[in-house]
Image: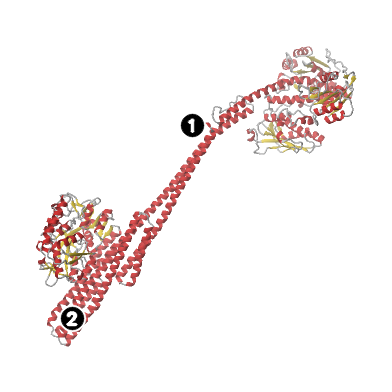
Amino acid sequence: MTSRRHFLRAAAVGALATRAPYVFAREPVTLRVMGTHVTLREEIRQRAMADLGLDIRFEPGGDSYVLQKASMHPESFDLYEQWSNSLNVLWRARAIQPIERQRIQAWDEINDLVKTGRLTPNASLGQGDAPYKLLFVQPDGGLDAQPSELVSFLPYVHNVDSFGYNTRVVPPGQPYVTESWGWLLDERWSGKVALVNAPDIGLFDVALAAQAQGLMEFANIGNMTQPEINKLFAILIDKKQRGHFSGFWNSVPESVDYLVSGRAVISSMFSPAVSSLNGQGVPVIYAAPKEGYRAWYGVMCLSSRTQGRVKDAAYEYMNWWLSGWPGAYVARQGYYISVPERSRPYLSAAEWDYWYEGKPAAHDLKSQDGTVAVKAGEVRTGGSYYERFSHVAVWNTIMDTYEYSLPRWHEFLLA
Amino acid sequence: MTRWLAMLNASLGARIFAGFGIVLVILAAQALTTNLRLDEAVANFKHFGHLNAEIASILDIERNALDLQRSVLAYSYTGYEGMLPRIRRLQEDLRAQTANVLSATPDAARRDRLQRMIGHFQMYARDFETAVEDRRLHDELLEEQEHKLGGFLSRELAELVDLALTRHDTRTAAEAGIALENLLLARQNALRFFSSPDASLIRAANERLDQFSAILKRLQPRVQDSEIRQRLAGVAARVSDYDRTFVGAVQATRGYLHMVNVVLAGEAAEIARLSAELKQLTLEQQAQAMRRMEQHIAFSQTASRTVSLFAIMVGLLSAWGITRAISRPITAVTRALTALARGQKDIQIPGRGRNDEIGAMAIAADIFKGKADELENASRYKSEFLANMSHELRTPLNSMLMLSKLLARNEEGNLTSEQVASARIVYDSGHDLLRLINDVLDLSKVEAGRMEVVPELRTIDDFAAALDRQFRHVAVAKSLAFTVEAAVRRAVCSDWGKIEQIVRNLLSNAFKFTAQGEVRVRIDRAPRGLAYLDAELAGSEVLAIAVTDTGIGIPEDKQEQIFEAFRQVDGTTSRKYGGTGLGLSISRNFAQLIGGELHVTSQLGQGSTFTLYLPLDRYAEPLATTATEPSQAHSHPDPEVLFRRYAVDVLLVDDDPRNLFAIGKILQSRVRTLYTAQDGQDALDRLRQQPGIHLVLMDIMMPTLDGYETSRAIRAQPKFQDLPVIALTARALAGDREKCLEAGASDYLAKPVDPEQLLQVMAFWLERRGDLPPRDAPPSAVPPTRPPEAAPVAPPRLAKNGRAITALIVDSDMRTTFSLARALQNRAARVLMAADGRKAQELATQRIVIDIVLIAQDLPDLDSATVIRSLRDAARERELGIIVLAVNAPESPPVGADACVAKPVDLEGVLTLTQALLDASGRIAHA
C-alpha cells in the first residue's frame, strides 16, 4: 500500500507540474501516432491527452506494416514510433522531417548513449547500426554521428535484450561470467529452446549463440555476409531437424506462454515477459550474457507532412515523453528512458534502485497491471543501467543481407 | 446362518441344491462380467475406430497445409495471381476440415489444439491477404518506378544529351550523359535488387541516384538554353518521385517477403507443430484405448479362467461331497443289504447315526435286517427239522418200497394181476413220496446251508450227450422234437451233479408242459452285457444253458412266483401236470449255490425259456477228480449168476426190524445164510461167531454202537481187513458217504435201497473176494432167521343198515382214486370212479343209489361244492355220506360235506369214518 500511495502521489505531482505550460491551446488538435504495441499503450494515451489537452490517436501495428505505411504514406501519421533500425528506410523515403533539437527541452539531459554511443568511456560500442550513427542530420542530407542542430529522431525508450531461462530446469549462471548466448544452442536444452520469429533480431540471437558455441565466427556480426548467413542457417536447420527448437514466438504473451506451459525452458525474450513470468511464479532469469546484449533504441520521428499546429502538438508530445512520467511508466516494464533523472521522481526509491541502479528490491515491486513483478530482495540481472549498456554486443540492425536471410528463415522455420 | 448350516447338514437335497446353486451363481457372475467387459471392449473399439478416422483427417490436413505453404511460396516468387483462388480455397478447405474434426472431438486437449489450429488458419488467411497486398504494391511500384518514371527519366536525359549536342553545348551533353549513366546504373542496381534482394544494391542504387541528383542540381543553373533548362527542371522534378517509389517498392518487397517467409512460415510451422501434437495425442489415446481393450480382454480371460477353474473346483468338490455324502453311504448300505440277502450274518447297517435321508434309510434297513434275521432263523430251524426228518421218513419208506417192489415182481407167482397192480401202485406212490422227500430235503439242505459244492471237470459235449440220452425216449413218447446243441466244446469245471439236476428238472418241466412242438437245449457263452443279480457274474465269462419249449408258457406276473417253494402258477397245475412244485425252487437254489443264476423268459401260450447262467471259470481247476461212485463205477457181474453159483453168507445189521424183513426178503432166496444183527454190538458178536461171513450190510443210524463205530471195530480186526462192508444209510446228507468210507466201509448205499442196486453192489464186492464157496458147500452152522410173516386178515365189509353199499370216488389223481377203490372194493358192493366233477354229476343222474361219496376238494373242472350240491340234489331225500379229501384239511367240513379228510389219505381212517357216516346216516339231518 505504501508504494501504491507513493506512486499515486508522485503521479499527481507530475501531472500538476507538467500541465501548466500547455493549457493555452485554443482548440484540441488531433495528433496521429503510428507505432508498435511497446509504446502505444492506452494508459500512456490517456495520460498524454490529460496532460496535454490534445486529441491523440494511436495506430499500433506490426513492425513491417507500420514501416511500410509510414514510408509510403507520410500523410497518414504525425508521429512515428519504432526502432532505430527502421530509421534509414523512413529517412530515405523522405517520410520524416528533421527534428529541431532546440525545441526539445530536455535535449541536454539526454544521456550520451545515443549521442556518442557510450554511457561510460570504457563501454563497448556494439556492432550494427548504433543509433548515434543515425541521429544527426548532416548538411548533405545524410545521417551521421557528427552533432548538428537537426536530428532524425527523438531518442527515448531503449533497452538491452537477451534470453530468459527457467531456473527450475536450467541452473542459474553468473552474469557476464558464465551466462552465455551459447546456451540457446546447448544440447542439454534440446527440444526446449524457443526463438523470436523475427529474423531482423532473432538472427542476431542465434548468431551470437553460434559464435559463443564456437561453431562459427563472424567478421562483423552487425553486417553478416551471405556465406556467413548460409553457414549459420546450415547449423540452425541441422539443429531444428534434430528437434532442438520447440517454437518461434510472435508476441510477448506468446513467449510468456511458452515458458509457463513448459514448451520452452530457455528462449529469446523481451523484458516485459520476464516481469510477467516472475509475476506468475515461473522463476525466470533474464540472462546477462558474457558476450554482451543485443541492444535497441526506440525512435520517435516526425512525419515529413506534418506542419503548423499539429507539428507544434507533435513537439509537445515529444517533450511530454521526456518529462518524467512516461519514462517511469516504461521503467516498470523494464525499459529505460533517455532522460532517467526526469523519471526518477515518478519512481519509488525501491523502483529506482531496482530498475536503474541494479540494487536489490527493497520490497515487492508491482508491474503496470498490479501484480508483483519483482519480489523483495531480487536484483535485476545484468546490474545497473550503466552496467548493462556497457555490455552491448550488437544493435538491432537491418543488414544488407536482410532480404537474403528471409527465404532462409522460411526454410529454417519449416525444416 | 447356523440354522442354514443345520439344514444343509440335515438334508442331502439341500446340499445338492446348494452345490449346484453355488456353481450356477459363479457361472452367472462370470457371464455377467464377461458381458460387461465385452460392452466396454466394443465401446473402446468404436473409440479406436473414431481415433483412426481422426488421424486420417489430421494427415489430410497436414498434407493440405503443406500444399498451401508450397503454393504461397510459389506465388511469392512468381506473383502470378491465377494461383490466388486455389490458395484461398485451400485455406477455406483447411479451416472446414479442422472445424469438422473439432466438432467430432470430445477430448479437451485435442480440442484445444484444433481450436488453436483454426486460429492460426485465420491468422494465416489474414496475413496472406496482406502479403498479396504487398506483392501487388510491389508490382505496381515497380511498374511505376521502372517502366514509367525510370523510362521517362532515361528517355528525357538521352534526348537532353541529343538536344545539347544539336545546340553544341557539349559540356551539358557530357554532364547529362554522366547523369544518364548514373541513372541507368541506379536502375540496374534497383532491378538487381528486385530480382535478388540485397540491401547493398539499394545502397548502390541510392548512391547512383544521389550522384544523378547532384549532377542535375549542378547542371541546372549553368544551362543557358531555355528549352534544355526547362526539360532539366522537368527531369529534376520527377527524380524525387522515382526515389520515393523505389523506397516504396523496396519496402513492399521486404514486406511481402517478410510476410511469406516469416509470418506465414511461422504460422505454418505452428500449424505443423499443432497437427503433430494432435497426431501424437490421438495416437496416444489410440494406444490407451488399445491398452484398455487389451486390459479388458486380459481381465475377461483371467476372470473367465479363474471362474471356470473355481467352478470346476467347486463342481468337483460338490461332486466329491455328494459322492461322499450320498453315493458311498448308499453303496455301503446296498452292500450290507446284499450281503444280508445272501445270508451273511453279523452285518452292521452303516450310516444309522446320520440325520439325513441316508440315515433314515439305514434305520429302515436295520429294521428290515432284524426281520430278515428272524425269518432266517425260522427258515433255518425249519430246514434243520426237515433234514432230520428225512431219516425218519426214509426208514419206513425203505421197507415199503422194497416190499412193494418184491410183491410187484410176483416172484413166487402166487399173486393175482390185481394184487400185482396194487403192489406197483404202492411202489409208485412210495417212489413219488421218496422223490418229494428228496426234493424237500434238497431244498432244506440248501436253505440250511448244508449243501456242498463238489466241482469236477466235465466236457460240455459229454453233458449234452447225457441229456440227449436221458430225454430222447420222453420226447419220442410225447412226439416232440428234441434237440441238444452245444456251441461250447471245452471242459468246464463246476458242480456237474447239481447242473445236471437243474437241467433235468428244467427238461422234465419242459416236456411236462409241452403238448406239441419242440423242446430244445442250447449251451453257449452268454452274451455280454446281461443283467445279473450277482455282480460277480457280470464281470466274468458266463456259460448259458437254455432250455426252450413251445409249451403253455407262464404269465408274466407269475414268472417270479414259480421259483418260490411250494407254489405253482395256480392250484390246478399240480393236479393237471403233477409234480411237487419244488423243482424250480431247488434249481434256483442250486444255481445260486454254484455261483450261477436261473432266468426265465416266457410268453403265455407260446412257450418258455429257462436259462441257467454259470460262471465258466469260477473253479480254475477241479478241486479233486471226484471218485466215481464205486457202486456205479465197476463192471457189474450178474448178481443172479453169482448167487446161483456161490454159497454166500451175509450179515445184515439194522435196528429196524422192517428193514431186516425187507432186505431179508430180497436176499433170502439168493444167499446161503443170512445172519441178522439188531445193533452194532450184536453184529460184532455175530462176526466173532461166524468169521466166515462173506459180506456185511451195515445200517449206520443205530442206537448204542452206530454203523461208523461198528465198521471201525470190524476193520480194527486184521482178519476183517478185506471183508466187504456196505454201509446203508437213510441220512442222505452231504458227507455221509465220505464218513462211511472213512469209517472203513467198502461201499455206500442210500436208503431206501433199490433191490437191483443192492444186489449189484453186493455181487461186485463178493466177486472181488475170490474165495466164495460154490453152492454145494455146506451151509453155515446157524440157520437163518426167518423173517416174520404177517397173518392174512379178511377185510371188514362196509354196510348200511346191513346192506352192502355203493361208493363214488371223485378225484383227478388216479392214484388216490385207485388206492381208495382198491381199499373199498372188498368192502363195498360197488365202487364208482369219476376223474372230475362232470363225470360225477353224470353218474349221479343215472339213478344209481350212492351211499357214500369220497370227493377231492380240488377238482380240475368244477368247484367241489357245486358237485356236492348236484350229488345231494340227485340223491333227493336219501341219505348220502360225503367225505371231502382235502390237501389241507379245514377245521370244519366244507359246505354240503359231512366230513373232511386230509390227503394223503389214511385208508383205515377213511374206512372207519365211512362206516361211522353210514351208521349215523339216519341221524343226520339235512337242511
Could you tell whether B690 is left or right of B374 in the image? right
Q: Earlier in the sequence, mark 1 or mark 2?
A: 1
**Amino acid type, mark 2:** Gly
Residue B579 sits in quarter: top right
Residue B169 sits in quarter: bottom left
Depicted B397 relative to depicted B252: above or below: above
In space, the residues marked 1 and 2 are separated at their CA atoms by 126 Å
- Give the image location of residue B291, x and y in percent: 40, 50
The mark closer to the camera, 1 or 2, is: 1
Q: Which mark is residue B3?
A: 1
- Give the image location of residue A36, x and y in percent: 21, 63
Q: Give the labeled residue for mark 2.
A: B234
Instruction: Look at the image and tell me whether residue B773 can be seen.
Output: no
Relative depth, front residue between A141 and B394: A141
Q: How many marks?
A: 2
Crowding at dot 1, Cα within 10 Å, few <14 / some 14-19 / many 20+, comes out as few
- Give the image location of residue B785, x and y in percent: 83, 14
Residue under the image location 26 percent in, 76 percent down:
B143
Relative depth, front residue between B603 and B177: B603
| Chain letter behind tag 2 | B
Crowding at dot 2, Cα within 10 Å, few <14 / some 14-19 / many 20+, comes out as few
